[in-house]
């Protein structure tokens, strides 16, 4: 059952109804559900479907392609010795098909592109010289290797340049989607538990598919990551290797970013990761962002050249914090429930979930239709200007000349602002106004799990966003 992919399903089906042939690319990080989306949308009614072999040689890839041709009805042909031969055979299969629309699905295309295979040349010839000129072919290509898809297909500067009719970046589930997914699978959990799972696994459907209804979320996390037979114990080792042909520099980048909550500038990444400054670094950062591992943003008042890159992939950060040390306790997560380590992690993880649900936050604030920018802001102490020194993790800067200064606080009950909280918030507001000289109105906004507990220090907060608001589907 497909959950929360209505826009993508509609786009795929609309493309299949068009009078001309369509070339479609679907990309996104490993385990996000690309193959499942395409198979379920078309109910496996493909004229031809084939998936590349992980690590297969050119000969093995061609042999597997030939086997797929046989499976879909082509017979009595000579095994192809090249991809040009293979696509000629695919043309024969398509021409013999009685289907009004020939849906061709090539999955894990990057694995088929072995060294000196000429796969892309054959694909270009197939589309430009034959399929693209017909009225009945829908070619869908897909790969988990996002960097390969971006370089070779989506931003292709050769024969496939500007040939795509549709590209779909399949993104992780939101909180509401995860809740719907659990309900569809007969698993009942409260939103606190779902939030905990999201802080660990993000919105990756494959990870959520392992959850059991007879276990609490904490017990599920032990089963998935810490038990002897944990199915996701080694997921990190495969994750980046499946997305990038040379994963080492990517791992250096995310490892460096994992040490600084607010993120790093390009120069800071170069220094921390011990890598060279080059255009290749720019491409790697773009690839990580296209794979939903990092986000880029700017500090308030800074120019684009001072872009900050922040690691926001929940699973990667959970791995660095808890899995990298390979704890031997099979009930490790259950035993961490009240630990200081876990409590500190909850605060940081909740901030990431909030950043991943900015549209839901804007919806609660009633500004979904207002143009906004999101920034962080940091200023060192400057006694001459009366600035004490502050850091603000999230500013929502609105076109209607209002800035929501967001404080994100994880709590197991309604959050009660302390005197220290009140003083810190007032200091941040004063520092920001002194340093920026902004004419925009500042609106202190609390983002927390269960809302604000009215008290002597709650009066400064003008807007409150709760966990329930983060779960609300976008209207």
Image: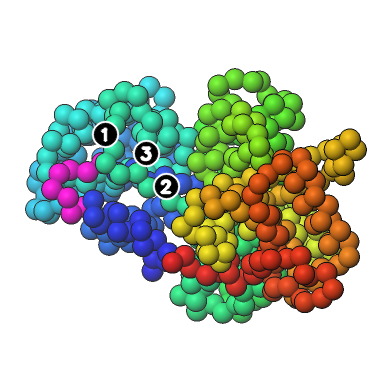
The quadrant of the picture occupied by the C terminus is bottom left
Give the residue displayed 47% in from the left and 52% down from the top.
171
Residue numbers of the magenta segment: 16-23
Badge nearest the viewer, 3 or 1: 1
Q: Residue 103, relative to residue 209: is it above or below?
A: above
What's the mark number on residue 103?
none
- Give x and y (percent) for residue 196: 67, 66
Give the residue displayed 38% in from the left and 69% down from the top.
1
Quick one: 165 or 147, which is closer to the camera?
165
Kindly tell me whether residue 95 is visible in this rendering.
yes
- Give x and y (percent) for residue 167: 35, 44
- Residue 353 in the figure: left or right of residue 423: left
- Between the C-alphas of marks 3 and 1, the distance is 17 Å
Instruction: List the residue tagged with mark 2.
Output: 169
Give the residue displayed 60% in from the left and 77% down from the top.
189
What's the mark number on residue 109?
3
**Count of residue discs:** 3
- N-terminal-most mark, 2 or 1: 1
User: Which quadrant holds residue 300?
Assistant: top right
Tag 3 secondary structure: helix
Quick one: 238 or 340, which is closer to the camera?
340
Contact? badges 3 and 1 (CB < 8 Å): no
Residue 367: within the magenta? Answer: no
């Amino acid at each position: 059952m497909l959950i929360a992919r209505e826009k993508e399903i509609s786009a795929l089906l609309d493309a299949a109804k068009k009078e001309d042939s369509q070339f479609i690319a679907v990309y996104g990080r490993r385990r996000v559900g690309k193959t499942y989306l395409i198979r379920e949308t078309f109910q496996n009614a493909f004229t031809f479907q084939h998936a590349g072999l992980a690590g297969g040689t050119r000969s093995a890839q061609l042999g597997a392609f030939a086997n797929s041709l046989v499976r879909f009805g082509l017979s009595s042909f000579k095994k192809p010795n090249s991809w040009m031969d293979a696509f000629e055979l695919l043309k024969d299969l398509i021409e013999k098909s009685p289907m009004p629309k020939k849906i061709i699905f090539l999955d894990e295309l990057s694995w088929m592109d072995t060294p000196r295979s000429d796969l892309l040349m054959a694909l270009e010839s197939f589309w430009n010289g034959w399929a693209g000129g017909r009225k009945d072919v829908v070619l869908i290509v897909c790969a988990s290797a996002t960097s390969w898809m971006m370089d070779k297909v989506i931003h292709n500067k050769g024969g496939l340049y500007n040939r795509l009719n549709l590209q779909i970046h399949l993104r992780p589930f939101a909180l509401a989607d995860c809740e719907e997914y659990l309900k569809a699978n007969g698993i009942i959990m409260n939103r606190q538990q779902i939030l905990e799972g999201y802080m660990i696994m993000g919105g990756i459907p494959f990870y959520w598919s392992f959850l059991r209804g007879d276990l609490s979320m904490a017990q599920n996390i032990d089963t998935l990551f810490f038990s002897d037979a944990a199915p996701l114990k080694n997921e990190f080792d495969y994750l980046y290797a499946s997305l990038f042909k040379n994963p080492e520099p990517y791992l250096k980048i995310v490892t460096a970013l994992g040490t600084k909550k607010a993120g790093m500038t390009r120069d800071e990444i170069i220094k921390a990761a011990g890598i060279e400054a080059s255009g290749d670094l720019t491409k790697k950062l773009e690839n990580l962002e296209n794979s939903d591992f990092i986000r880029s943003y700017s500090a308030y008042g800074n120019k684009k050249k001072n872009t900050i890159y922040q690691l926001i992939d929940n699973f990667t950060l959970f791995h660095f914090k808890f899995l990298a040390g390979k704890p031997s306790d099979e009930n490790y997560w259950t035993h961490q429930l009240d630990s200081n380590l876990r409590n500190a992690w909850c605060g940081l993880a909740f901030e990431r979930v909030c950043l991943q649900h900015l549209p839901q936050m804007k919806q609660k604030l009633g500004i979904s239709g207002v143009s906004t920018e999101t920034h962080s802001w940091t200023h060192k102490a400057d006694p001459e200007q009366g600035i004490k020194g502050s850091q603000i993790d999230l500013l929502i800067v609105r076109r209607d000349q209002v800035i929501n200064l967001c404080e994100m606080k994880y709590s197991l009950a309604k959050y009660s602002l302390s005197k220290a909280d009140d003083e810190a918030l007032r200091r941040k507001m004063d520092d920001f106004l002194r340093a920026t000289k902004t004419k925009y109105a500042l609106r202190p906004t609390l983002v927390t799990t269960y809302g604000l507990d009215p008290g002597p220090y709650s009066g400064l907060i003008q807007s409150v966003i709760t966990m329930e608001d983060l779960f609300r589907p976008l209207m």
